Image (cartoon, grey):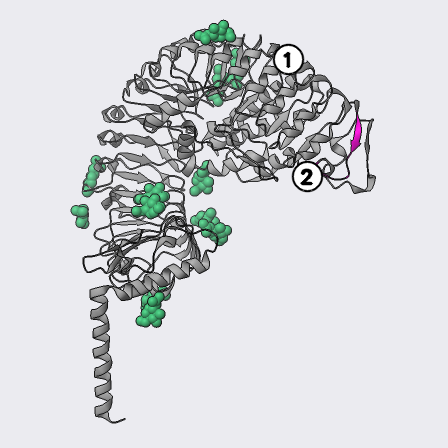
Amino acid sequence: MSEKEAGFSSHVVVFLFLILLAGRGIAGLGDKEVVVKLKRFLQSNNKIYSGGYARWNEADPTPCRWPGVTCNDDERVTGIDLSDSSISGPMFVGFSNLTELEHLDLSDNTIDGRLPPDLNQCGGLRYLNLSQNLLDEELNLTGLVNLRIVDLTSNRFEGEIRGKFQAMCANLVLLNISANNFTGEITGSFDECPNLQYLDLSTNKFTGEIWKGFAKLREFSMADNNLTGEILSETFPSNCSLEFLDLSSNKLAGELPDSVANCSKLEHLNLWNNSFSGAIPSGIGELAKLQRLFLGSNRFHRKIPEELLNCKELVYLDLSENNFGHEMQGIFGRLVTLQSLTLQENYYSGGIESSGILKLPDLFTLDLSFNNFSGELPVEIAAMPKIMYLMLAYNNFSGSIPPEFGSIAGLQVLDLSYNRLTGRIPPELGKLRSLLWLMLANNRLSGEIPPEMGNCSSLLWVNLAGNKISGRIPSEISRMGRDPDPTFQANRRGISVGSLSGQCPSMTRWIPVNYPPFNFIYTLLNPKRCQTTWDLILKGHNYFPTCASSNSQVITVPFSGYLQLTGNVLSGEVPQEIGKMRFLRLLYLDGNQLSGNLPAEISSLPLVVLNVSCNLFSGQIPSEIGSLRCLNSLDLSRNNFSGELPMSLNQLSELNQFNVSFNPLLSGVVPATGQIATFGNDSFIGDPLISYSSPSSYPSPPPTFGNSSTVYLGTSRSKVGFWIPFVVSFLVFGVASFVICLRIRTLVSIVSRILTIENFVTRSSDHRS
Ligand SMILES: *[C@@H]1O[C@H](CO)[C@@H](O)[C@H](O)[C@H]1NC(C)=O
Ligand SMILES: *[C@@H]1O[C@H](CO)[C@@H](O)[C@H](O)[C@H]1NC(C)=O
Ligand SMILES: *[C@@H]1O[C@H](CO)[C@@H](O)[C@H](O)[C@H]1NC(C)=O
Ligand SMILES: *[C@@H]1O[C@H](CO)[C@@H](O)[C@H](O)[C@H]1NC(C)=O
Ligand SMILES: *[C@@H]1O[C@H](CO)[C@@H](O)[C@H](O)[C@H]1NC(C)=O
Ligand SMILES: *[C@@H]1O[C@H](CO)[C@@H](O)[C@H](O)[C@H]1NC(C)=O
Ligand SMILES: *[C@@H]1O[C@H](CO)[C@@H](O)[C@H](O)[C@H]1NC(C)=O
Ligand SMILES: *[C@@H]1O[C@H](CO)[C@@H](O)[C@H](O)[C@H]1NC(C)=O
Ligand SMILES: *[C@@H]1O[C@H](CO)[C@@H](O)[C@H](O)[C@H]1NC(C)=O
Ligand SMILES: *[C@@H]1O[C@H](CO)[C@@H](O)[C@H](O)[C@H]1NC(C)=O
Ligand SMILES: *[C@@H]1O[C@H](CO)[C@@H](O)[C@H](O)[C@H]1NC(C)=O
Ligand SMILES: *[C@@H]1O[C@H](CO)[C@@H](O)[C@H](O)[C@H]1NC(C)=O
């Protein structure tokens, strides 16, 4: 080929190329081809589920009206939105061929693997959302210099952050890389991003000192990393523009500098779970717009600055888990805008009335649990106009529950567990139509369960374990929790309902820990998700598992309630009306003196757990129990059941805990196959009339609830105080059932007393160390 020819042919190539480009420019044909390739790629990787792309009709002249595709006036594709489209498999290669692409949203799928280098050539991208996927390895977006908004939340990206954003951040306004595995120090990485306003680096593995330049942002979250060192005074310069600052769950120490006063636009300040010490700086009083202040789980000391009164918009105040003690400071009663006050896990011993907190006009959450309060419960609580969530657990309150508590019209949570309350449950509590939780466990309450409790139509979650409650279970109780919907509806209409501090200590106390079907909820109760989980539960979104039994009959109930009456002295028969409690998923009646037949009506409940061990039940085990398709745990041990072990139990395909031990009159043959055959001898100890169909075929028993609690307890928890509820429930519900029944109650109260006292001891040593 001569030079001339070569020149000519290269001209032809360029010419053809230009025609091609022009053609694409006019008709968008090239873009259509790419989008069709995208569709086919997605279809080949997702054979079962498909998203909106399945409706992309290839016969259409342009892709511009396909769902999720946007174009400009020239019919060039400028946006692809495939969020929440059930896409799995690797990322499509070829987005860079859409040369006008500005907006790419692939969030909320299960795309995995690493980002193809092709993406780094989409130089026109302004918006990139890859959040909620399984993308991993190192990130390289250096070519995307026009990006304004980048959301990579919840993936598996890793590696040092240094060098990843410096070169491309000229236009960056929002960067969210929360919940990944990024490492290293951030210092310097964002100094040269002139437009950056929202930066979320939370839940990664960043180390070293905090980046000193963050005060130029509007929003900065560094929560849940491994930062150390102090915050220097110059970090908050006079032109600080922060509105939202979250440094929770790091290892920052030293004093919070008074210069925080410069950040006069701050609305949200979260320093929860660090090692800050010294006084709360009076400069906080300059933050006139501050609404939410979380200082819990630090080592701030007793003086709360008067200047805090200048924060005229403060609604949430969390000072839990600090070294505050003695009388509650009077300043709390003057923070009249407060809606939520959480002071749990301190050492306060008085001042509930004198501080004036009970007169705060807008307070709807008050958590004073894990303190050192004693004496009678203040009756003034009944006059709090807006109180909805009242937590006074783990103190030393004594005397009886004031009947006036029954007139707190809006009350949804009443948690008085682990105190020394005596007397009977006041029948007036039956007036609490909005009550969802009633936690009175581990007190010294006596008398009968008032039938009026049946009027608590929202009450789904009841724990009265470890008291001295006697008499029969009233049949009226079956009306309890029959219709919680009005309360949930009201909560859905309201704005954000509750506020708990990071650890969700009360929630972990309220949700049964020790049964496997509920274990999953603890992964949801991390500090990050606690607030939303709590919010959803209060709005009646069913967070508890539904049961898909192996014969594919899915059993759903809109709400999952429980009734926990373990370790009392209840007697008489269980009323057959109990079968009407249509939302009851867990029923614990163990460790009482209940007698007579177990009513067959129990089988109309959507039960997951049924524990009636350590009672005086007699007669046949109702064969109807075999229709409780979702039953995971059935404990009938230590009673006087007689007759044949019903073969219907063998249909309980979900059952993984089963115990009929110590029913000496129970007879029958343990089948060789089926669900019951999966349990070992320990399920039948002390049943001399039970025989085995084939003695060689007993497998070892599946993990019992004791084991699963141990597994949970085995996870690392730094604070002993946090363990206590788990330990106690484990002991109360796990170990206690092996101890001679009639002693349960004393054991429960001894154990709880030891642990409550020990809790104070360990906590004080914890704080000292
Ligand atoms: C993108 O363009 C290149 C050539 O420029 C081509 O090889 C590739 O197949 C195209 N990819 C798609 C998905 O269209
Ligand atoms: C990214 O997508 C998620 C899920 O679709 C969405 O919730 C989030 O707001 C988006 N992020 C941004 C910055 O738009
Ligand atoms: C990132 O990609 C660009 C080209 O797209 C390349 O030049 C650069 O070396 C890559 N950086 C890393 C760290 O791989
Ligand atoms: C982070 O990396 C660790 C191992 O280094 C891994 O166990 C963990 O699952 C990763 N987390 C995420 C969110 O990818
Ligand atoms: C980052 O994403 C998380 C999870 O979606 C969200 O909660 C957070 O508000 C986002 N941060 C910013 C600054 O948008
Ligand atoms: C946190 O950082 C320290 C050093 O500063 C290191 O020893 C420790 O392993 C880190 N912890 C985690 C969970 O990354
Ligand atoms: C804030 O003040 C510092 C000097 O104190 C200056 O360097 C910086 O540019 C200022 N930032 C803004 C956003 O004005
Ligand atoms: C408190 O912060 C530390 C350090 O970042 C973290 O390891 C721990 O899990 C946090 N505690 C809770 C209860 O989140
Ligand atoms: C505000 O920042 C300036 C420096 O920009 C500093 O000198 C001053 O002390 C700060 N204000 C307060 C109340 O600390
Ligand atoms: C708790 O209060 C009692 C008095 O009621 C007091 O003797 C005890 O020292 C207090 N404990 C702590 C840890 O403050
Ligand atoms: C609780 O109060 C009783 C007196 O009512 C007292 O004997 C006991 O020491 C207190 N317990 C704690 C832990 O303060
Ligand atoms: C409350 O319960 C009691 C006893 O069950 C009943 O007699 C009474 O009528 C109920 N009150 C209302 C207002 O429903």
Residue at 26% over, 29% down? 282
Q: Nearer the viewer, mark 2 or mark 1?
A: 2
The residue positioned 28% from the left and 47% from the top of the image is 212
Please say if 764 is above or below 554.
Answer: above
First to last magenta residue range: 667-675
Quarter of the rendered image showing ligand 8:
top left
List the single residue furthest toward the bottom. 2
Between 295 and 63, the one lying in front of the other is 63
Q: Which residue is mark 1?
A: 569
Q: Which one is in front, 482 or 424?
A: 482
Q: Amino acid at mark 2?
A: Pro
Q: Is residue 614 left or right of residue 494?
A: right
Q: Secondary structure at mark 2?
A: loop
**Residue drawn at 37 percent across, 34 percent down:** 277
Q: Position of residue 598 (x, y in %)?
A: 67, 19
Residue 119 position within the rendered picture, expressed as x and y whole percent measured from the top left:
33, 62
* Nearest to the observer: residue 211 or residue 303: 211
* Disc 1 residue type (three-letter): Val
Mark 2 or mark 1, which has the lower sequence index?
1
Residue 668 falls within the magenta-colored stretch: yes
Label at residue 702:
2
> Compared to 55, does 651 lie above or below?
above
Q: CA distance from mark 2 to mark 1?
A: 31 Å
Asked if the magenta segment contains residue 391, the reply would be no
Residue 501 appears in view: no
